[in-house]
């Protein structure tokens, strides 16, 4: 049974303030670096068979201490990349509320139809993350795979696995350095854990 440990990156200065999207150079801040070190300590003895990451700097920095401790390579998986936010990249939430309120609230409330100006439709995000999960399932049958990604990308994966509408993603959280676990079940996936933070067990059953 293949298990995917879907983990959101650690904290950075844009967290809760705006949309860095795929901007280059978005690095972890000091709290984020401490979270990355804590993650390495927490999962030091975990039976992880492979590590994959979004190409974004913040995801790679989050997993780097753990990968070094385990002596494992970090493979880049573009299917788990951050959303392409197009014209919203680098915008603050207060700016979007002020200048682009209708589109912004459409994004929040109707993700199944939403697309940032010049960016990626959220339905495409949901499709590509499921494609990535199926690819890793084929590459790692019966293994446990750690995947570093982003909050809304992980939400899309969980919603698909649970059969939840993409319009209801605001009904649950994916916190920084939280782990959600899905396991291969028949032709689909079974959700085992949602949003477990570092204070939980080192590796969910």
Image (cartoon, grey):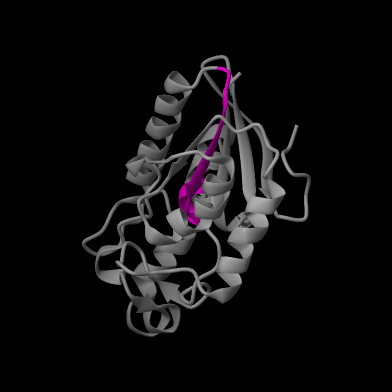
Instruction: Give 11 or 19, whichever is nearer the viewer.
Output: 11
Residue drawn at (65%, 31%), measured in percent from left and top?
47
The region drawn magenta spans 142-154
Residue drawn at (44%, 61%), measured in percent from left and top?
58
Query: Horizontally, is 88 left or right of 158 in the view?
Result: left
Instruction: Give 61 or 128, whichever is nearer the viewer.
Output: 61
* Count of numbered marks: 0
Instruction: Give 86 or 25, whichever is nearer the viewer.
Output: 25
Instruction: Give 95 or 7, whichever is nearer the viewer.
Output: 7
Looking at this view, name the residue that lies furthest to the top. Answer: 186
Look at the picture and state if 151 lies above or below 75.
below
Residue 110 seen in the figure? no
Q: Quadrant of the N terminus?
A: top right
Residue 98: x, y in percent? 38, 85
Whether 41 is among the magenta residues is: no
Residue 201 seen in the figure? yes
């Amino acid at each position: 049974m293949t298990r995917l440990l879907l983990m959101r990156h650690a904290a950075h200065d844009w967290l809760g303030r705006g949309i860095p999207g795929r901007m280059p150079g978005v690095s972890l801040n000091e709290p984020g670096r401490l979270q990355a070190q804590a993650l390495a300590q927490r999962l030091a003895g975990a039976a992880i068979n492979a590590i994959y990451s979004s190409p974004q700097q913040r995801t790679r920095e989050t997993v780097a201490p753990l990968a070094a401790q385990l002596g494992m390579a970090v493979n880049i998986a573009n299917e788990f990349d951050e959303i392409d936010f197009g014209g919203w990249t680098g915008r603050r939430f207060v700016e979007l509320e002020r200048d682009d309120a209708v589109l912004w609230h459409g994004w929040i409330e109707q993700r199944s139809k939403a697309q940032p100006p010049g960016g990626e439709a959220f339905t495409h995000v949901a499709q590509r993350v499921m494609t990535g999960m199926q690819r890793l399932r084929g590459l790692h049958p019966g293994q446990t795979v750690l995947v570093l990604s982003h909050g809304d990308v992980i939400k899309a994966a969980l919603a698909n696995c649970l059969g939840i509408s993409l319009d209801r993603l605001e009904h649950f959280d994916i916190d920084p350095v939280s782990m959600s676990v899905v396991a291969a079940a028949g032709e689909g996936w079974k959700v085992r854990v949602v949003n477990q933070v570092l204070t939980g067990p080192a590796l969910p059953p």
